[in-house]
Amino acid sequence: MEKYKVILNNNVIATATNNDKVIDLIKKHVKDIEYQPYVCIKNHMFSSMNETIMDDCTISVCKNFFESSRRTYINSAILILSHVTKQIFPDKNLNILHSMCDGVYCEFTDKKCDEDIVEKIKQAFSKCVENNFQIEPSLISKISAIQYFNSIDRKDTADLLRYCSNNYVTLYTLDGKKYWEQAPVAPSTGLINIYDIIPYSNGFVFRGPIEGSSGKLKEFTNQERLYEIFQEFVNWGKILSLSTISDINKNIINHNIYDVIKISEALQEKKIALIADKITSAKKKLVFIAGPSSSGKTTFAKKVAIQLRVLGYKAIVLSLDDYFKDNDELQEEQGENLNFEVLEALDLKLLNEHLNLLLGGYKIALPKFDFLQGKKVTSKRMIKTDDNTILIFEGIHGINPGLTKGIDNSVKFKIYISALTHLNFDDKNRIATHDMRLIRRIVRDYKYRGHNAAKTIQMWKKVVEGETKYIFKYQGNSDIMFNSSLVYEMSVLKNDAEKVLHQIPFEHPSYPEAERLLQLLSFFLPIDADEVPRTSLLREFLGGSSFED
């Protein structure tokens, strides 16, 4: 029997045979630390713990219930949902649509889902968890996988795999049935035991634990507006006949993608025009735009300004970043490690003073924050407003109620912007909006900030933590939400993102995440960036925007 050398967590050397699974070695040799039992890193790539060891390798465990563990948890839950709903409703097709309420929103194709149906799903899910079925990975040829999914009437998955650039794919077997999953799943169903399934609109929401808290659910918060904006984009997808990656790829092959680009851009422009109509009809004087990183806030603000000018108004775009406190003042308040993401990093007194002066018709000299000097400098830009002027501010705290306490709410219009894609791998595997924003940022950081992909990936966790603390919880305060996602954008971003991601050495800590993103991008056929209009919001990340200063 052949033996293999396995290095666990960079310090434990173990011996394995070709019958040993990763999970067996971890249980036997990793006893000095607590670890998450959902997924591991094998040879610098995320892997199933049920994978059989076939060669010398390195294996690392995930110590905390952060992004990779939670992603595996939710993906494993989706696999179980797919399995049990087919068992109890063989004539119905379940669609896993999008993130929502600390989980995922799901619908049947016929949109028929009452409380009795949800209760049956909950019971079947609970039984599957109780049975603790093993979820076994197996590597098979792409051709064999396509033939298999065609044979069981899963054309959506078969069509997806046709465009995959890899010759082999991993399938996961649960209770005798095979499934394709976008990323490794948990080794057994019994691990997915903290959850809730609740009826919602035409379907239901599966809720799981949030990052950093694997043992409990957060209190339910109804994200009605988020649901509405997703549904709006789903409807746009119907207009374009696009809901999966294979739909995009078919349009590229058939040379119809140019019409898709034009219609996508036109739909987005129409939405911005409608927002401008709402601002003016409500007679608002101040517009505040907020959203997470890589949402396209800067270009969106400029597009809103143009639409306001079309309606005959003078629109002035300003950045909240120019109202940061000087570094010296922040150091007195925070110490040496400055945090520019908290609301208190802004000079709120000056901002509110300026806004009151402008609303009163007075002229002011705008500040300009010099990041190199770490302080505000007085710019030569003087502005004054009149009855026909609308001020537009963009920044992460734009819809935080603490930002403009000294200003009457009747003059404010608050917009929340994010990139919320409805596009999925297939009916059962969604593309996380989180991933779209990360890929946008990787491309932008490389082009404009001199950051390689490794640095962007390493910074991303802190970026998301800041968004959770300071942005997401205020999205309900907005007057309207705007979805900045473009259905075709991943095929364009793919060109630059792949080049940058491939530069990360395999020994770097960000390599597993880079490989995961490369796997995601591998399913998209490319679109030349020259096809993207110079006025597109996507140009904020690609470069070449006509809105660049």
Image (tube, rainbow, N blue to C red):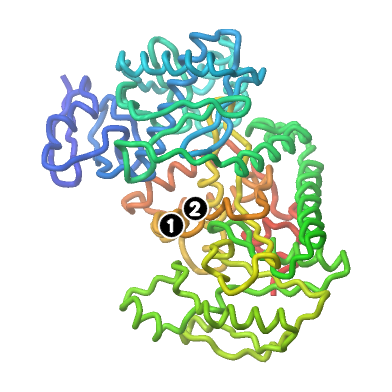
Q: Which mark is residue 529?
A: none
Q: Is residue 350 above or below residue 140?
A: below
In the image shown, does 293 or 125 lie closer to the viewer? 125
* Quadrant of the image containing the C terminus: bottom right
- State whether residue 541 appears in this view: yes
Q: Secondary structure at mark 2?
A: helix
- Which residue lies under the disc numbered 1? 469
Q: Secondary structure at mark 1?
A: helix
The answer to whether the residues at label 1 and label 2 have Cβ atoms under 8 Å apart is yes
The amino acid type, in three-letter code, at marker 2 is Lys
Q: Position of residue 323 (x, y in %)?
A: 55, 79
User: Can you tell which quarter of the image residue 535 is in?
Assistant: bottom right
Q: Residue at x 50, y 68 (%)?
A: 450
* Quadrant of the image containing the N terminus: top left
Q: Residue at x 66, y 40 (%)?
A: 228
Give the number of marks: 2
Q: Which mark is residue 473?
A: 2
State how far apart marks 1 and 2 are (Cα).
Answer: 7 Å
Q: Residue at x 28, y 44 (%)?
A: 64
Q: Position of residue 74 (x, y in %)?
A: 42, 33
Q: Is residue 104 left or right of residue 6?
A: right
Q: Residue at x 76, y 45 (%)?
A: 264
Q: Position of residue 344 (x, y in %)?
A: 44, 72
